[in-house]
Image: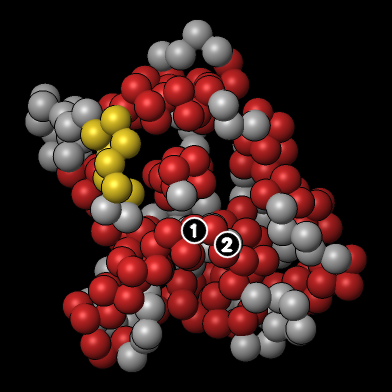
Amino acid sequence: MNRAGGEAAATVLVIAGRSIDIDTAVATAHGYPAVTVTRYDLPGPGPAAVITADEIARTHKVRSRISHAQRDWFIRTAVDAPWEAVPIEAQLVDADPNVSGELYDRAEALYEHFRTAAPRHVRVAKISKVLHLKRPGLFPILDSKVMAFYRHHARAATARYPHRGRRAMFWAAIRDDVCTNLDSGALPMFRCRLAQSEAEQVRRLASLTDVRLLDLLTWAIA
């Protein structure tokens, strides 16, 4: 099953130029910490336009290391953030960097709202772990490991979007992989295999967004 509705599906996922077969991906999912999914992912994005103390606590399950002072900053800064421009159900595949004034720009404005006002030691990793929780289909988690793994592809992506004026475009590179794996049918097949697992903790992974599924696989192979 591929995104176009065809029957044939690839049996290999491609992540930053590296291949991982579906069987290996499923085995990797079996080893992913159940507590991370239960605590960080499954409670969902919560209220659309606020960040709560409990949500910041949830990010500790993905090693955000957000302090109490930083937690309070996130909560304050969220009050006037442009949440309404970015729907909870927004998906990265719909955020085309070639299209100005639409979802990509609105997502960037939301991210920049936090980045430009960030205190010392609050950088892309912490911001992305919070924003992924609030808009899980849209914002990839960009910690140092993921960024190192995607760096070459993120830099290459800038050549296709010179009007963006960026030295690296991690969202675009990850979006490329999400689109590729949806179109090939590999990502839907992976999700189907997860849903059919005998292990409940693995079946739960099937409810995660495309962005998050690729994230947990990236961590495993990086």
Secondary structure under the numbered disc 1 in the rendered image: helix
> Mark 2 and mark 1 in contact (Cβ < 8 Å)?
yes
Residue annotated with mark 1: 146
Instruction: Residue at the far right: name it.
Output: 68
Residue at 38 percent of width and 27 percent of height:
24
Colour pattern:
secondary structure
Residue at 67 percent of width and 49 percent of height:
62
Nearest to the observer: residue 187 or residue 107: 187
Q: Distance between the residues labelled 1 and 2?
A: 6 Å
Q: Where is residue 68 in the image (x, y as percent from the top left)?
A: 89, 66
Residue 32 seen by the camera: yes
Q: Identify which amino acid the numbered label 2 is placed on.
A: Asp
Residue annotated with mark 2: 143
Q: Quadrant of residue 127?
A: bottom right
Nearest to the observer: residue 143 or residue 82: 143
Q: Identify which amino acid the numbered label 1 is placed on.
A: Val
10 Å crowding of disc 2: few (<14), some (14-19), many (20+): some
**Against 119, is 36 above or below?**
above
Residue at 75 percent of width and 77 percent of height:
121
Nearest to the observer: residue 142 or residue 136: 142
Q: Position of residue 169 (x, y in %)?
A: 37, 74
Residue at 29 percent of width and 30 percent of height:
21
The answer to whether residue 110 is left or right of residue 152 is: right
